[in-house]
Amino acid sequence: MRDGFDPMLENSVSTRRNVGLDSALDDARARLVAAHPDSLARHRQAASVLPGGNTRAVLHYDPFPLTFTGGSGCRVTTLDGIELVDLVSEYSAGLYGHSDPVIAAALQAAVDRGIVLGAPNTVEASYAAALVDRFPGFERVRFCNSGTEANVMAISTARAVTGRGTIIAMAEGYHGGVLTFAHGGSPLNLPFDFAFATCNDIDGTRALIRERAGDLAAVILEPMMGGGGCIPADPGFLAMIREETRAAGALMILDEVMTSRLDFRGLHGAHGITPDLLTMGKYLGGGASFGVFGGRAEVMDRFDPSQPGAFSHGGTFNNNVLSMSAGYAGFTRVLTEPALTAMNATGDALREGIAAALDRHGLAACVTGRGSLMNIHFVPGPVSTPAPLDAADPRHLALLHAELLLAGFYIAPRGMIALSLPFGAAEAADFLSALDAILAVHARHLPRRH
Ligand SMILES: Cc1ncc(COP(=O)(O)O)c(C=O)c1O
């Protein structure tokens, strides 16, 4: 902690007079440490049995991640008893908030009826029918346990049905823990033969698809890069991939694990693009673990176990009654079209408010995204491919993240914001005034527009 600094006396952003970005960041982190002694103690204890106290990479940030004890609506409570407005929303999986009564009742009813049944249950086919009915890209679906698993299954399916090996993905894309393409990729990635294109580079991507056409099994991409920085794919880019994959005899896989919430019919539905295979997850489990992959009947029917030579797809918990019940109740009874539209409209308004604040304070910064998913970047906009984001200094987002936590708002350390249904206009207004106050104090520590 900085010498002579007493966080108990000085924990409000308005009293800070920092010189230099590093000392501003140290100062904010010192106030966070001082305000969260119980979280720090829990983190230290966890580190003796979990590597770095962590079991999910994205949840780590410096100086240590705050522990939450519970949540209600769009608010969470830390172990030190501090309430935060939640703008992470479990990286988009928390769309229903933390305490939706319809989902709670569905979970309770499932528990009352009996769990781990080990047979087809009465919910899975109804849920499958609801998904097929709403999303044009699904003619048949299969459930699994995570978005990662859904993408692994989609890629493996594409390789099996085409008899080819190459997968084209987007540089800096994210499709799960073993399909991580940010910053040159992960050593833990699956050993598929990947080739990389650049999101929204129509000519380069078309040329790559044609060059690899002979062995191309699939192109996988998100209709808006989520983990890659909330960068929407242009409709023309998606249409080109649809056309070129078809011409190459390869499959188009759209990963809508994050983005399916951006339109009632999914982002592929909004753009009128029907992929061969489509993956989803996150909020569709109603808060329980969940993944789903599906697509054209002709492809998916290869999984029909009554047919000779069928693909075998296992998974103990694929149809577990907790995920099926919570997911089905949320999807059919809570996520109505007006509710989804209102949440995305709140997001559009919030993004405009953030952009205006960044502009008002003269910052070389921008906010990307669509509807209820967005990302603040400390690089000048507009950003339509991931490359410009390399120029960002991570200390800028770290400072904003720490100051927002101190002000009672939880955003992702990488600047991402995902809204939930209970997040309303009042929370948006409070967030924008907190942001304004932070930017007023710290504008000199952040990149300036010239
Ligand atoms: C686009 C995308 N695909 C796949 C995944 C992986 O989903 P899961 O964490 O459920 O494995 C994520 C998770 O953030 C994601 O954003």
Image: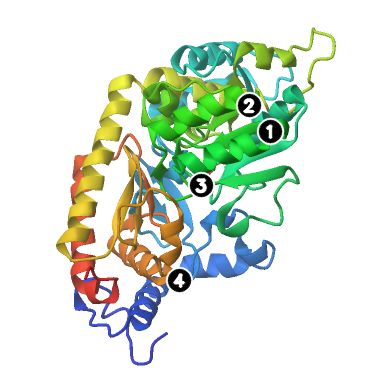
Is residue 145 depicted above or below 363 in this figure?
A: above
Q: 244 or 16, which lies in front?
A: 244
Q: Which mark is residue 248?
A: 2
Question: Does label 2 point to a residue whose CB lies under 8 Å from ligand 1?
Answer: no
In which image quadrant can residue 10 be found? bottom left
First along the sequence among labels 1 and 2:
1
Question: Does label 3 point to a residue whose CB lies under 8 Å from ligand 1?
Answer: no
Q: Which mark is residue 37?
A: 4
**Residue drawn at point x = 35 percent, y = 83 percent:** 23
User: SS at mark 4?
Assistant: helix
Q: 232 or 26, which lies in front?
A: 232
First along the sequence among labels 3 and 4:
4
Colour scheme of this structure image?
rainbow
Circles 1 and 2: CB atoms closer than 8 Å: yes
**Residue occupied by mark 3:** 198
User: SS at mark 1?
Assistant: strand
User: SS at mark 2?
Assistant: helix
**Residue drawn at point x = 58 percent, y = 35 percent:** 220
Q: Quadrant of the N terminus?
A: bottom left
Residue 118: where, in percent of width, then height?
74, 20
